[in-house]
Amino acid sequence: MKYAGLLVMPAGFFLSIAAVLLFPAPAPRTAFVLCGLAVEGLGLVVAVRGHMEPRGESRR
Amino acid sequence: MNPIPPTALPFSEATFVLVLALLMVAPLAIAGVALINTGLGRSRSAAQSLLGNLVILAVAAIVFTIVGAALAGNLTDTASVAGRTFHLAGKPWNWIGSGRLFLGGIGSAQPQSQLALLFEFLAVALAAMLPWGSGADRLRLTAGCAAAAVMSATVFPLTAHWIWGGGWLAQLGVNFSLGAGFLDGGGAATVHTLGGLSALAMVWIAGSRKGKFPKEGLSTALPGHNAVYVLFGCLLALVGWLAWNVAGAVLWLHAPLASLPVTALNTLLSASSAVVATFAVTRIRFGKPDASLCANGWMAGLVASTACAGLITPAASLFVGLVAGIATPLLVELCELALSIDDPSGAITVHAAGGLWGLLAVGIFAHQPGQLVAQLVGIAALLGLILPLIYLLFWLLNRVHPFRVDPDGERIGMDLHELGGGAYPDFVIHRDESYR
């Protein structure tokens, strides 16, 4: 799980780069760059969850 | 505030002397961070912590001399950009520098390039010190040095070339009409976000301090051992930061001399509003202001200003600092209580989050068409490419040379275990109840 999150994050980066390359208009370009960042955010959340130490009953 | 000139003009003699003088003062920022790292650690690891900061600085400088500066590619004898380029969608993507090893050609380099190189030496030293602070009380000294060497030879030169060496992020404005390209006046990306993300990777790989997160109940509070070090480090850092941001504005943003007082003022205002905000937040949350969190807030304000002090108005600087100051204590609490991230120096919150906020603020307040997208693409590169890369490098390094000391070393303290003597030989060291 911890490595899966870190593997998802480059996908978000390449989505942002694709947005810059493929969309000359500002609105779709901005939207897709933000989508790329959202994918990176999801990857980061998964990586953080994967690295959390198991503690207490609520986290079992 | 300032429209960014597309190319740098040759320095006048006065500008050269000014920047050189500023770069002689900027190491006070490094000294301040070193004191903060030490003060926020435990007393039985204080000497190892401060020695580690010193040695890491030295290792970073040596490795950057041997290989890093060549890959950063700022040392050129012409005004043109040197680097390796590939073409994609009809545009050049300059991705890495192609200078000479061992600072070859420094004698014939332009004066401006030499100052840029000096700035990069300070930047790489500070970036390499940040993971050391987060790994306090459990990292081997040699592992800290090895991590600094890896950063100085790989990720720092790569990032510095992309942003400061005419790389693809700096060229986003020319190639894709995204404002003036990715802007980072003082190293919010290359130093602070990079260092903060490296600290996150280090903490993830090394794990938390023993007893920090017990199986049941809340995390154990392991407060820093010397608030005076921490707060004096903050004051020292201010002096260094003023010089750092002003020098960066001249070198990387090509700011005119007349705009430099505002750059210094913005730095001070950002830190000031940040510390007042943190003071208020901790006073409301805990009933009393928290000294170490206020120090973190002050530093977060300075870090956020690093990206944008040369580009925004004083009112915007107050806002940037306010947001950094409110977010810092909340993020520190989130990391510790909810996310099991044991970060004694707070580098992940202060430097990574503060740096990212400053970079975003450039896009929000710089008022150039496309600038916000350029900043977002730069942030995407840092999070999506650099963080996984530094994690991979640290993971491999940890397999070769484990980061963490053995449990007995952690129990007796890093000073006795690694150095054979404590920082405070006349003090009684309290028994640690968390090891029972």
Image (spheres, helix red, strand yellow):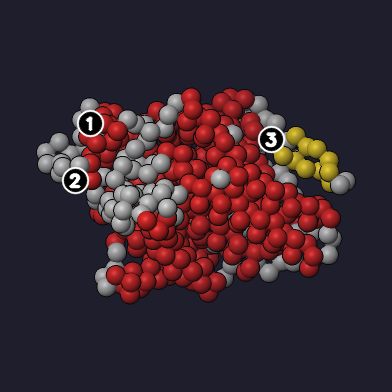
Q: Amino acid at mark 1?
A: Leu
Query: Helix, strand or loop at disc 2?
Result: helix
Foreground of the two, B180 or B414: B414
Mark on residue B433? 2
Q: Residue furthest right?
A: B90
Return the residue at label 1: B416
**Which mark is first along the chain, 2 or 3?**
3
Query: Helix, strand or loop at disc 1?
Result: helix
Foreground of the two, B431 or B424: B431
Q: Is residue B429 above or below residue B300?
A: above
Q: Nearer the viewer, mark 1 or mark 3?
A: 1
Total numbered badges shown on the rendered structure: 3
In this orientation, does residue B166 appear? no
Q: Is residue B228 above or below residue B278?
A: above
Return the residue at label 3: B97
Q: Residue at x 39, y 63 (%)?
A: B329
Q: CA distance from mark 3 to mark 2?
A: 52 Å
**Which mark is first along the chain, 3 or 1?**
3
Q: Nearer the viewer, mark 3 or mark 2?
A: 2
